[in-house]
Amino acid sequence: MNKFPFRPHRFLRELIATIGVTGLGIATMLLFLMPLGYMLATAFKLDSQLSAQNAPLWPARAVTYNYQGTDYPLYDVPTEQGVKRLVLIHPYREDSDVLDPTNPEAGIFNIKGRWRTWNPVYQFSPTLENFIKAWNEVNFTLLFRNTLTIAILSTIGDLVSCILVAYGFARFRIPGKNILFLILMATIMLPPQATIIPMYIFFNKLGWTGTWLPLIVPAFFANAYDVFLLRQYLMTIPREMDEAAMIDGASPLRILVSVIVPQAIPAITAVTLFHFFYRWNQYFEPLVYLAGKDELFPISVGIARFVQTYTIYPGRAAATAALTLVLPALMFFFAQRQFMQGVVITGVEK
Amino acid sequence: MFTRVISIPHQLQQVRTSALRRREAIWGFLFLTPWIIGFFGFQLLPILMTIFLSFTDYTGTKEFAPGNFNFVGLDNYARLFSDLYAVPAMGVTLKFALIGIPLGLVVPLYFAVLVNSRYLIASNFFRTLFFMPTVIPIVAGTIIFGGVLNAQSGWINLSLKAIGIEDPPRWFSDPFWAVPALNLLGVWSSGNAMLILLAALQGVPTELYEAATVDGANAITKFFNITVPMISPVIFYNVTLGVIGAFQYFVPAMLIGGLNGDPQRSLLFFPLHFYREAFSFSEMGYASVLALLIFVVTMIATGFLFFFVQRLVYYAGAD
């Protein structure tokens, strides 16, 4: 008995749907990634190419032809015999002196037509000059080191505190727990602006402004987003194993470390990455607490001035942006399977 | 072991459970301690202090100590009405929110439905790439958008010209288009919303679709009558986060338009106005009023969502 009969109509419909949806996906993707394409193209080309007439969008340079010791540009010139590739020796307004590179012995001859309407010949030629300039202009090693130190220390604090708090909310019967959880979730509404002035005054009194402490220490006291995410995940872990461990006399802390945490790795990965990206991104707090301390700046504050100069030096600005996003992008690509799993599972329950 | 528990007299057992309960509660509180300290130290006390400061003329140039500031009653609140920038700045923030919230609802939903479709080849690849811009630091993203939305050389405008739009928007150089340009940047990094929606889509029971197919429903009917109601809690969650985020938003605006919110103050978002008053002009007393206003507006908007919009949400578990 044939359980899956081949039905041509059905097959054709599926095929058309697949082509249609995948085509739509590719079109959306191209539009969506256009900014990244722009960034890479701009980072790898000289700024002079941006203002050049008829220059291609990809990194390229004009092809030249050496004639009697001088480099002259090559153009694709429309003639009666079709488009010909000619060397422009002397440009005039309505006509020009050109040379046929396939037959240089014939010498320079004059041709009618405005050279400005001709297309210059380009060849693909990426340059690293913008990256070198950006690297010399910005102290990337210092900025990377600063950002990594802040990010790693605060991520440790965030993980330890949020796992503890999420465990408390997920597994223990505490009087008033629902109200506490509601308060926790309500703190998401609290804008950072509403607390930053007193925090600034407070950290200033402690002598912590101009150091990384205001950026690192608060991470050790948990935050609503990450607690919520971890709690959602912990609630999906069956209780049998921690109950078994409890009967064996393990303390709650012991159960957390040896039973719960190993099972919550996808959620912990997701929270780690979220927090790390958040720190890599953070701008407002470092700007306030580290004002004037350039040598302590994280990368976001360190490269901010390039936003203003992108119109003047687009290549260097694009190269700076590319250098800044390489590390988070790589981290994401390597951890993406775990990451997606963690978010997708925790996201199921609203 | 069980027999021993059962053999304990009833009263004794109750004493034991209540002792266990207490132990459990103590452990639980112990685990919550980091958050409870953080909540009091970094949230509740500071917000009370902001309220306190809003009644003083404290400026950041002096050390915070008695004698360095005076109580001025409601002067700071009255100043709100003579502040030339406060109302336009709130207008900029509202404009951003009104464009950004619907965009932040529709675009991630479109991406999630697309990458959840069984007709999409290599959907994992698409998921990864649609999420990717979310991990790009906001400063780098702002640099990139400044370039790609450049009025002359940006690829967006070159594309618009290529498809026949003679006079494309001048984006960050045009006071009208500067805010929508930032909305585009916001949509670009809405990967989190997409992932959460994707998870919700995968949680919709397939039986519902099968039953609808038997009844002869087409894809569009199924989307609006099954998918949208089933994932509406997550849509609501995303919208709520979007509203809260919109009222705090200002960093890319400051990076593009500077402290003045150029061009022509079109990027002077309300939180940017706050930042200027607090940290550029050190007017911390008055800035506290602005900060509280951000908080109050956020609460009103969120409250509105919970009291009026949440009715539209379908909770499968509830009846």
Image (spheres, rainbow, N blue to C red):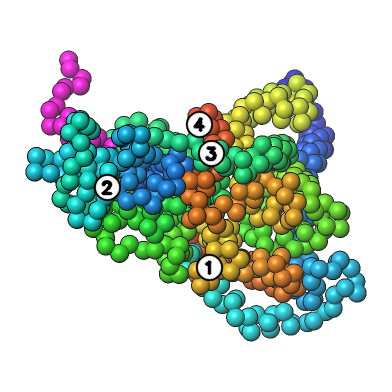
Is residue A4 shown in magenta?
A: yes
Residue A236, given in percent of the width and then of the height, sits at: 57, 34
Q: List the residue tagged with mark 4.
A: A333
Estimate the x, y position of residue A216 in percent, counting from the top left. 75, 44
Disc 1 designates what residue?
A: B262
Q: CA gap, disc 2 to disc 1?
A: 46 Å
Tell me, yes or no, whether the highlighted magenta stretch contains residue B168. Answer: no
**Where residue A79 sits: x, y (%)?**
12, 44
Badge 4 and badge 3 in a common chain: yes
Which residue type carries mark 2?
His
User: As rendered, which of A21 and A32 lies closer to the eye?
Assistant: A32
> Residue drawn 20% across and 20% down?
A3
Q: CA distance from mark 3 to mark 2?
A: 36 Å
Q: Crowdedness of circle 4 by 10 Å Cα count: few (<14), some, many (20+)?
A: some
**Which mark sits nearer the N-terminus, 4 or 3?**
3
Q: Which residue is mark 2?
A: A90
Report the quarter where the N terminus of chain B lies. Answer: top right
Closer to the eye: label 3 or 1 = 3
Q: Which mark is residue A131?
A: 3
Q: How many marks?
A: 4
Left or right: where A155 falls relative to A14 = right
Q: Within 10 Å of the Cα at label 3, are there few (<14), some (14-19), or many (20+) other Cα atoms?
A: many
The answer for which chain carries disc 4 is A
Closer to the eye: label 1 or 4: 1
Q: Nearer the viewer, residue B7 or B19?
A: B19
Q: Which span is picked out in magenta?
A: A1-25
Helix, strand or loop for disc 1: loop
Where B208 sits versus B96, above or below?
A: above
Q: Amino acid at mark 1?
A: Asp
